[in-house]
Amino acid sequence: MNHTSFFLSFFFLFASQLIAQNDIYVLSNAQSIDPNRYEGIDGNPYFFKQWMSADAYNYQMEKFDSLRVNFNGKTGEMEARQGNSFLELDQKFYARIVISAERNEGIFPSDAGEQLIFQQKLHKTFANRWPILVYKGKDFSLIREFSSIVSTKTFEDVGKTIEKKRFIRRNSYFLLQGGKLSLIKTQKKKLLASLKHRSEMERFIKKNKINLKQQDGLEKLFAYYDQLGG
């Protein structure tokens, strides 16, 4: 059964259900989302600059490929797009979205390594959102949460008040270990102070010129941290 054909048929027909392998998978908001809903706000709330080719997995890890997606940091929803139509992936049915550099050559973020994994059910803190699983170790996980908020500034211009709105992007990193979720700072001193094996980690950062402002740098660092025993 060709899952890709089912998805394309779904989008074109605006149906509310997709049948595959005798199971029904539902995308929420079968109607189109207004593409102009952020008119008047500078920038946009999306994680990616362009819509990306992705693979989606349900909770049985069945794969559905070739979706066009982007993550909306304002709503916390993963959106799928076909033409001018926008839909939100239903989190009850979709567990993981994988976006690879190979599939998105030329438009994949240069600081994100080989792939980005948006994963459900990592921790209750991220309920109804799509955090990024940066690295999964033997007994810990490094998690990134992207969000976008609207900043409003007002100023006076020739006797009238003008509002200026723009999207502000935010990234937060968390360490999940032993069931405990901790916010971590990515500045070198603060990060090392919150982890074990400080001297070894510091040497690794210096030797390998790790950029802690980039996800692929953090991924490499925590892969080494995993080797040290976390």
Image (spheres, grey):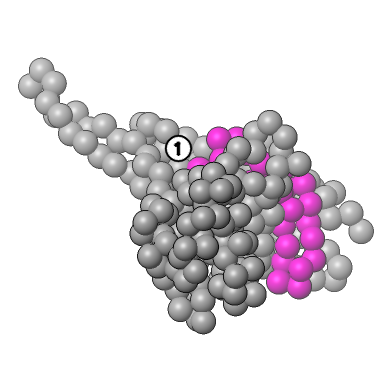
Q: Quadrant of residue 225?
A: bottom right
Position of 63 with respect to 221 (left or right) is right
Q: Is residue 120 visible?
A: no
Which quadrant would the C terminus be assigned to in this image? bottom right
Position of residue 155 relative to residue 111, above or below, is above
Q: Secondary structure at mark 1?
A: loop
Labels in figure, total = 1
Q: Nearer the viewer, residue 186 or 19?
A: 186
At x 18%, y 34%, the residue is 154
Number of other residues with Cα within 10 Å of mark 1, as a class: few under 14, some 14 to 19, many 20 or more: many
Residue most extreme to the bottom? 178
**Toward which corner of the image does residue 162 lie, by quadrant?**
top left
In the rendered view, would you say 35 is above or below 116?
Answer: above
Q: Is residue 229 visible?
A: yes
Quadrant in which residue 125 is drawn: bottom left
Residues 209 and 149: in front is: 209
Residue 156, horizontal then vertical, whole percent: 12, 26
Highlighted magenta segment, given as a residue range: 46-72
**Three-letter code for the amino acid on which mark 1 is drawn:** Asn
- 115 on left or right of 141: right
Query: Is 149 situated left or right of 121 in this image?
Result: left
Does residue 165 appear left or right of residue 173 in this picture? left
Residue 146 lies in the magenta stretch: no
- Is 67 above or below relative to 173? above
Is residue 48 shown in magenta? yes
Q: Magenta stretch: dominant SS?
A: strand
Query: Which residue bears the numbered disc 1?
Result: 44
Instruction: Give residue 130's position: percent from left, percent from top.
Output: 54, 60
Residue shown at 60% from the left, 39% from the top: 109
Q: Quadrant of the N terminus?
A: bottom right
